[in-house]
Image: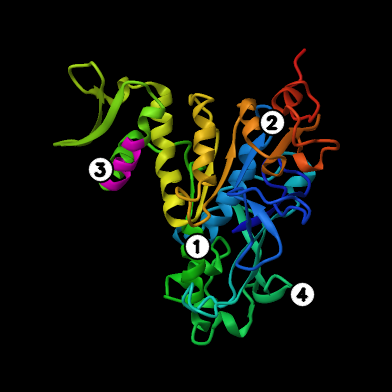
Amino acid sequence: MIYRLEIENFYCMRDPAVIDLRIAENVPDVPGRFDPLFPRADERAPRVIAFFGPNASGKSTVLKALAFMAWFARDSFQLQPNASLPYERFNDAEAQSLPTRLAVEFSGPVDLAADIGTEGTIYGTWRYELEMKGREHGNSVVREALRQKPLGKGKWTRVFERSAGGLTEAGKMFGLAGYSMVIDKVRDNASLISTLAQFDHKPSLRLRDAAARIYTNILLDRTDTPDPDLIRYYATNPNVVEALNREIERIDVGIRRMEIHNTPTGPVAQFVHEGLQQPMHWVLESHGTRSFIRYFPMLYAALANGSMALVDEIDVSIHPLVLPEIVRWFHDPERNPRGARLWMTCHAASLLEDLLKEEVFLCEKDGLGRTSIYSLQDVKRVRRADNRYRKYLSGVYGAVPHIG
């Protein structure tokens, strides 16, 4: 479970920003809303969080920071040797000369080489840190580190730490014996994890696989998945089509099902409608239907695997009455028996009535274009019985557009 994210000098995040999901001990348990960080842990965090704020306030940047870290740990070895890391620093003269710092804290088994879920598995918390700077032809890594706390207590213990010069210091549990030739060749635009995973280093494979279980529509190299790629995904995953068809009537009244048909030029998606003689082609469906179909594989995979979905602008073209239903999937013990998580950005203020204050974060920019982030828990005198929809739109919580 990811429970903390730190961002500094990354796109519009000029100053250090912290998203810490841990909730106070005196917050009462609400079924399906909060989980312990790991089995028998004292600290808890919500399954679902939503980021609200005006357009261009930095909501998407939060998800982009986490998506970037997952990509870096998982796939950065695939970059060309001289390629720049795909991110931007804050756009002012001073920030361009300063490093970008990202860190994420998460929970999991302490022994990365052991099988998960075996009797006697010891859990704890982990901290993965990145520091990057600009170079002559782009961005590169100057420090990468992984630390842990068994049982989530005590001081952080180093698992590995890598500097710009390529020096790697690692604890015994990371098992670098026999990998000296690989370590010396880790590029400054690739992660140690992604590199070692190419050589079947078991702890790195475990970490890479964990990063691969973060599903998102935040793509670093393009804005959206092309329609043909999406339809090919459905064509090769009939179980996802079946699951989608169980839900699709919630999005568009009259749609019975989506069908995938193979043609000489590739698979095509068609929709069978109530009362219509012929199926409708993908491009003739509403924007809302197509948006939901784009999001559904991420949500389905996260729920099936007990992992994480990062969905940017989840409310685009989707009816406000459908959004609470999606949130309920993650709160429902039958739909989400493995404790999957959902981080989302949205503008639909009506959704605030279906969320607890521990599940809401707000983003806003100052006059210099710098984003700040705060939790609704941090706003004074927010009561559970409040009409949060009305108070947010009236500006009580901040993070609303200033018009006029």
Q: Amino acid at mark 2?
A: Gly
Label 4 sits on residue: 154
Q: Amino acid at mark 1?
A: Ala
Label 1 sits on residue: 210
Q: Nearer the viewer, residue 276 or 317?
A: 276
Q: Position of residue 70 (x, y in %)?
A: 54, 56
Left or right, 336 with respect to 293, comes to right
Residue bounds of the magenta highlight = 237-246
Name the N-terminal-most of marks 4 and 1: 4
Left or right, 141 with respect to 238, comes to right
Residue visible at 72% across and 36% down? 363
Name the N-terminal-most of marks 3 and 1: 1
Label 2 sits on residue: 53
Label 3 sits on residue: 235
Label 3 crowd (10 A; few <14 / some 14-19 / many >=20): many
Q: What distance separates the C-alpha of mark 3 from that of mark 1?
A: 26 Å
At mark 4, the secondary structure is loop
Q: Nearer the viewer, residue 398 or 60?
A: 398
Q: Position of residue 221 (x, y in %)?
A: 48, 43
User: In the picture shown, does residue 37 fall above or below 274?
Assistant: below
Residue 141 part of the magenta-drawn span: no
Q: Please identify the quarter of the rendering in which residue 375 is found.
A: top right
